[in-house]
Image (cartoon, rainbow, N blue to C red):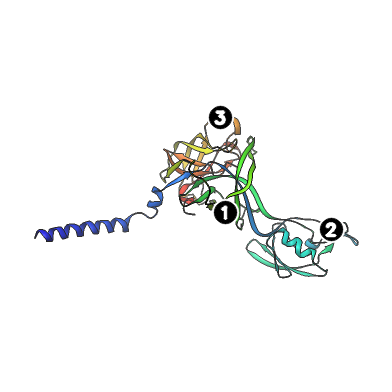
Amino acid sequence: MQKLKRKIFWLLISVGIVAAMLFSPIGASAQNDDVYLGGMPAGFTLGIGGAQIVGICEVLTENGVQNPAKQAELSVGDVIISFRDVKIEDAADMDGVLSNFGGGEAEITVERGKETLKKHITPVKDMTSGRYKLGVLIRDSISGIGTVTYIRKDGRFGSLGHAVAASDGSLMDVDEGSIFNCSIVNVVKGERGRAGELKGLFVNDKKIATADKNCAVGIFGKMESDYDCTHLQTVSISEEAQPGRAVIYSTIDGIIPKEYAISIIKVDKGNKQNKNFVIKITDKELLQETGGIVQGMSGSPIVQNGKLIGAVTHVFLNDPTRGYGTAIENMIGQ
C-alpha cells in the first residue's frame, strides 16, 4: 500500500511538470532571458542587391545631348539587376559591363517595387570620357547612423526600431550589410517643424556585426565573434510597460551611452504600426543638447523599472520633445 502511494505521488508530480511545460505561455523563457543593453551608436552600410538609380541625367555626345534612360522609361528608384544577361550586384559591375560595351541596343532588367521589368536601352558614348553611359546616377548601398537596442546572449542584435525605407516610404530590400563602431561628433538640435540629427564618424573600417534583416521594427543581424560584450550592462526584458517614469539610453557625444529621463505618456500594445508608446523627453541635459528626439537616436532602448521594454522609433515634427516607441516583444525574436 505504501509503495502504491509513493507511485501515485511521483505520477502526480510528473503530470504537474508536463502540464506546466504544455501550458506555459509561449515566449515566457525569452521574456526571462537577460540581454546586453544597447544605446551605443553604430554606422550602417547596407547593400541593396544591385545598382539603384538615384538620378536621371543627360549625356553630352557628338550628336548632341541625349538621355538613354529616359527613352528606355527607367525611373529613379529602379534597381538594375542585370544588363545583357550579366548580373549586376553593385556599381562596379555596371561600370565593368559598360567599359566592355561595343554599342547598339541592350536588354536591361530592373526591379521597381515588387515588379521585375525588362527594358531595352541604347547606351551612348560620352564625348568627354569616350565611355558608353546610360544617363543614370546609381548607388549600390546606403549608409547611416542609428542606435543598437540590445544584443542577445547568442550574439544576435536588434537596432533602429523601425525599417529602413525607400524614397516612396516602402520597405527597402537590403542585401547583407556591415555594421561599424561610430562616434558622435556633432548634434543638430531639433526644433518645431524640423527634425534634429546626430552626426558621427565611423571609428575604423573593422566591422563589428553583419546585418541580415530589414523589417518593420528595425535592422537585425549577428555580432562578430570577437566583439566584446563584457563592458555592457545586462538587463531583463519585460512586456509590462505602463504610463509613468522611464529612461532611455542613448549617445549624443562620443561612443558611451548615457541614461536620460523620459515619461511614457501612452501605452498602446495593439498599435498596427508598432507605435506602442508615446514618450516625452523630460531630462534637462538631453533637452538642452538636442531639443528632444533627433535622427540617429532611433533604437535607443527604453527601460522602465530596470527592465527593457522597447525602443525609440520616431519624433513628432511639431514637438521634438515627444515621439513614439515600439515594444520590445516586436523586436526580440527577429
**Residue visible at 84% across and 58% down?**
59
Badge 2 marks a residue whose secondary structure is strand
Which marked residue is nearer to the observer: mark 1 or mark 3? Answer: 1
Percent x, y for residue 150?
Answer: 50, 46
Furthest-left residue in this view: 1
Residue type, numbered disc 3: Glu
**Residue 11 image offset from top left, x and y in percent:** 20, 60
Residue 135 position in % (x across, y down): 79, 59
Whether residue 59 is visible to the viewer of this picture, yes or no, is yes
Does residue 59 appear to the left or right of 167 in the view shown?
A: right
Of the image marks 3 and 2, the number of the one nearer the N terminus:
2
Would residue 30 be found to the left or right of residue 20 on screen?
Answer: right
Which secondary structure, mark 3?
Answer: helix
Instruction: Check whether the beta carbons of the residues at disc 1 and disc 3 lie within 8 A of each other.
Output: no
Name the residue at 64% across, 57% down.
48
Q: Amino acid at mark 1?
A: Ala
Mark 1: few/some/many CA within 10 Å (<14, 14-19, 20+):
many
Residue annotated with mark 3: 285
Distance in Å between CA atoms under marks 2 and 1: 37 Å
- As drawn, 275 above or below 110: above
Q: For residue 294, which quarter of the picture?
A: top right
* Amino acid on which the number 2 mark rests in the picture: Val
Q: Is residue 243 above or below residue 61?
A: above
Q: Give the labeled residue for mark 1.
A: 211
Within 10 Å of disc 2 (Cα), the crowding (few <14, some 14-19, many 20+) is many
Q: What residue would you read off at disc 2? A: 59
Q: Earlier in the sequence, mark 1 or mark 3?
A: 1
Query: Residue 254 got which mark?
Result: none
User: Viewed as shown, does residue 322 lie left or right of 205?
Assistant: left
Instruction: Please name whichever residue, 258 or 96, is drawn nearer the observer in this view of the structure.
Output: 96
For the residues carrying marks 2 and 1, which lies nearer the camera in this image? Answer: 1
